[in-house]
């Protein structure tokens, strides 16, 4: 995010309008998000604050407002200075940036600046430990003696209209504010208090930028107003109708809330005058249109084309929303199909598991049958007279002898081997 600061007093409400034109020239050329810091006093009304906030939000940027009052020491030193008759106290607010804005780095712009470049190009410059980066003043060689009388070097004297402040480096110098107050106290006759003070305190350690980042306007028809940054530092500003750059000012101001349609009073005279009010030639011609509420609007003619573009943009936005809804519907259908496919896969996995269970059960039954088959046994008796009955069971088959078959016969005793009949006692035949 780029940090950008502007400072001004708004006694008659015009400088807030000039600041809006500067911001519009920055916003229209910059893609990176910008965080704007406005340093002001009580003269900035709530209405103009809301306009500036609306301008920033329309370009998706952020804006912050800082009510500022000069410190007591600085106010006492400047109380007897005649320079504030030409330069307002708002020009000195930039000297207090290290204490007011809690960021590491910030770009400061005056309100008479036209930006024709992406401001991120200026933001990305590495200061290499310097306090600030600025462009050498292009008009100082006309008064080198005046600058030298304040202890400043005309060869390195820079302009304070466009400055990149490295606030962290400045805060590390604990005596920077004391040096600011001492310079204003020792040189109360300075004609440019903010610029001379910055050169005195930080001029020994600053990075000199290319002149294209702060090109002074010469106010002639052949002037190149499309340089990177144009500074209307003279007496004729770019908002003056006699300035060759007035059309550029109007072009940027038309992008701000200050160029919305102005509504005339509700009570109109009985006869509407047909003569148009006097309009500066450089401004676009206007026409009147009667609304349903019987109010008359002064509408710039060039506003017709933007209104047409706005309708086209709204139509494109609706078409885009329709396409987005259709895309969301297709995505939902695709998600439903994916869920159905996942359900089918789960069902298939369940069937496979059931089949595996059945196979295991079949194998178990086969094993049990094989075990039963192996347990079937047949015992053959040793005694032919003994008759056994085969019994199939889980336990070992036990033969059951036939009692009639094992009764001894009346024949002479004989030894029956392999039977369970007890042998008779041996007789002594001697």
Image: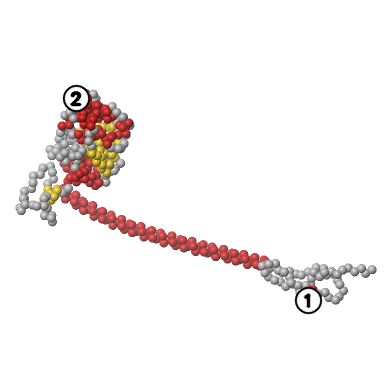
Query: Residue at the spot x=17%, y=42% of the render?
Result: 250
Q: In the rendering, which numbered label is found on residue 417?
A: none
Whole-percent x, y for residue 58 in the image: 24, 47
Relative to 292, residue 184 above or below: above
What residue is shown with label 2? 146
The secondary structure type at the circle numbered 2 is helix
Query: Dividing the picture into quarters, in which one does residue 424 lie?
Result: bottom right
- Residue 23's spot in the image, x, y percent? 22, 41
Nearer-the-camera pick, 139 or 151? 151
Give how far apart the Cα atoms at labels 2 and 1 are. 155 Å
Residue under label 1, please give it. Answer: 404
Residue 351 as seen in the image, left or right of residue 233:
right
Name the residue at 22% across, 28% down: 184
| Nearest to N terminus: mark 2 or mark 1 | 2
- Residue placed most toward the observer, 372 or 178: 178
Residue 44: where, in percent of width, then height? 19, 41
């Amino acid at each position: 995010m780029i940090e950008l600061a502007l400072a001004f007093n708004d006694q008659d409400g015009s400088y807030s309008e000039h600041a809006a034109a500067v911001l519009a020239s920055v916003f229209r050329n910059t893609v990176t998000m910008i965080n704007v810091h406005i340093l002001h006093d009580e003269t900035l009304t709530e209405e103009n604050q809301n306009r500036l906030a609306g301008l920033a939000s329309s370009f998706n940027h952020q804006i912050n407002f800082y009510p500022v009052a000069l410190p007591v020491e600085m106010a006492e030193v400047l109380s007897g200075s005649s320079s504030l008759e030409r330069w307002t106290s708002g020009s000195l607010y930039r000297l207090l940036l290290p204490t007011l804005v809690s960021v590491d780095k910030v770009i400061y712009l005056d309100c008479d600046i036209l930006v024709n470049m992406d401001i991120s190009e200026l933001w990305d410059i590495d200061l290499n430990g310097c306090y600030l980066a600025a462009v050498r003043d292009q008009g100082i060689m006309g008064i080198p003696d005046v600058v030298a009388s304040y202890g400043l070097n005309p060869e390195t004297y820079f302009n304070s209209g466009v400055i990149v402040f490295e606030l962290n480096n400045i805060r590390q110098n604990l005596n920077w504010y004391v040096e600011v107050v001492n310079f204003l106290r020792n040189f109360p006759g300075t004609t440019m208090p903010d610029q001379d003070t910055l050169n005195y305190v930080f001029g020994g350690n600053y990075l000199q930028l290319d002149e294209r980042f702060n090109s002074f306007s010469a106010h002639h028809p052949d002037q190149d107003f499309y340089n990177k940054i144009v500074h209307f530092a003279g007496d004729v500003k770019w908002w003056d109708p006699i300035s060759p750059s007035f059309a550029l000012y109007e072009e940027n101001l038309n992008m701000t809330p200050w160029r919305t349609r102005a509504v005339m009073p509700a009570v109109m005279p009985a006869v509407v005058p047909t003569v148009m009010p006097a309009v500066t030639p450089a401004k676009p011609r206007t026409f009147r249109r009667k609304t349903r509420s019987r109010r008359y609007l002064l509408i710039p003619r060039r506003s017709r084309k933007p209104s047409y573009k706005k309708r086209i943009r709204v139509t494109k936005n609706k078409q885009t929303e329709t396409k987005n809804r259709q895309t969301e519907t297709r995505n939902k259908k695709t998600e439903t199909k994916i869920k159905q496919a996942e359900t089918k896969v789960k069902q298939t996995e369940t069937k496979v598991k059931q089949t595996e269970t059945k196979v295991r059960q079949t194998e178990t039954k086969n094993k049990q049958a094989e075990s039963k088959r192996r347990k079937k046994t047949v015992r053959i008796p040793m005694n032919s007279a003994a008759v056994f009955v085969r019994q199939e069971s889980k336990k070992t088959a036990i033969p059951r002898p036939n009692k009639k078959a094992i009764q001894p016969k009346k024949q002479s005793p004989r030894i029956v081997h392999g039977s369970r009949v007890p042998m008779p006692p041996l007789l002594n035949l001697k």
